């Protein structure tokens, strides 16, 4: 297998942390999105959507989308379990993972892609027609990402993890989002002591450096 990756991008980082938690090594190839390498014909032949991460299987099948890749790896390497062991836990992990992704990561990405100069004509990820940055979408992303941060503070009151009582994929997404949010000036402040302590705990895990 080969993982098409980008060191600075948040979604590939989720996969790398997941692999590190599993103790799984996969060959990786860097794709520089900032320079537009993901839009080159060679990469589009691998993934016509032009997104990363992309996992190319040994039989030639391709998987994109971070969580789909992680689910595939979970199927191959069930332990440690990161998606939920019981029907209830799996459902609980799924809902919190989605909240971290859609309420957090999605809105931080909107703030970033609609303000970063390199994406002035690439407001939407991957291949497609030019999509000019829209300042109002950046403003909305900021507003909703800050709401996510406030709600995360409430969720972490008396808790060590986002879902269940152990480390799961929901924690990976939350941690990556917290680091990504710094790129758009959103940080846990004095009013977010639970989030700050949580971030420190997850950062102390060896996988956080992946």
Image (cartoon, rainbow, N blue to C red):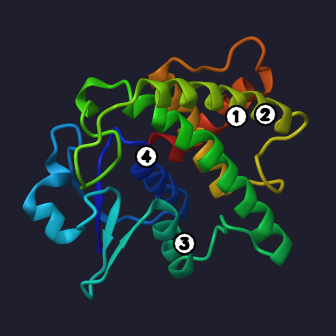
Residue 151 badge: 2
**Alpha carbon distance from label 1 to label 3:** 25 Å
> Mark 3 Cα within 10 Å, few/some/many (few <14, many 20+)?
some
Find residue 76 and report its horizontal and vertical position in percent: 51, 81
The quadrant of the picture occupied by the N terminus is bottom left
Q: Residue furthest top?
A: 190
> Are the residues tagged 1 and 2 within 8 Å (C-beta)?
yes
> Are the residues tagged 1 and 3 within 8 Å (C-beta)?
no
Residue 148 badge: 1
- Identify which residue is drawn at 74% across, 59% down: 95
Residue that carries the numbered disc 3 in the rendered image? 71
Q: Secondary structure at mark 4?
A: loop
Q: Nearer the viewer, mark 3 or mark 2?
A: 2
Residue that carries the numbered disc 4 in the rendered image? 210
> Are the residues tagged 4 and 2 within 8 Å (C-beta)?
no
Q: Earlier in the sequence, mark 3 or mark 2?
A: 3
Up-down relation of residue 119 to residue 19 (above or below): above
**Alpha carbon distance from label 4 to label 3:** 18 Å
> Are the residues tagged 4 and 1 within 8 Å (C-beta)?
no
Q: Secondary structure at mark 3?
A: helix
Q: Secondary structure at mark 2?
A: helix
């Amino acid at each position: 297998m080969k993982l098409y990756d980008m060191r600075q991008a948040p979604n590939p980082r989720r996969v790398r942390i997941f692999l590190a938690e599993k103790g799984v090594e996969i060959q990786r190839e860097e794709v520089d999105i900032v320079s537009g390498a993901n839009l080159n014909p060679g990469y589009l032949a691998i993934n016509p959507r032009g997104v990363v991460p992309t996992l190319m299987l040994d039989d030639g099948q391709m998987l994109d989308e971070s969580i789909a890749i992680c689910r595939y790896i979970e199927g191959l390497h069930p332990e440690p379990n990161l998606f939920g062991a019981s029907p209830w836990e799996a459902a609980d992990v799924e809902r919190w993972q989605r909240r971290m992704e859609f309420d957090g990561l999605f809105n931080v990405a909107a703030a970033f892609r609609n303000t970063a100069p390199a994406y002035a004509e690439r407001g939407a990820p991957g291949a497609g027609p030019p999509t000019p940055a829209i300042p109002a979408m950046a403003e909305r992303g900021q507003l909703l990402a800050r709401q996510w941060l406030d709600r995360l503070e409430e969720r972490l009151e008396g808790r060590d993890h986002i879902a269940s009582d152990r480390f799961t994929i929901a924690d990976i997404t939350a941690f990556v989002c917290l680091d990504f949010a710094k790129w758009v000036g959103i940080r846990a402040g004095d009013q977010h002591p639970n989030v700050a302590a949580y971030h420190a705990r997850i950062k102390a895990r060896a996988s956080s450096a992946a």
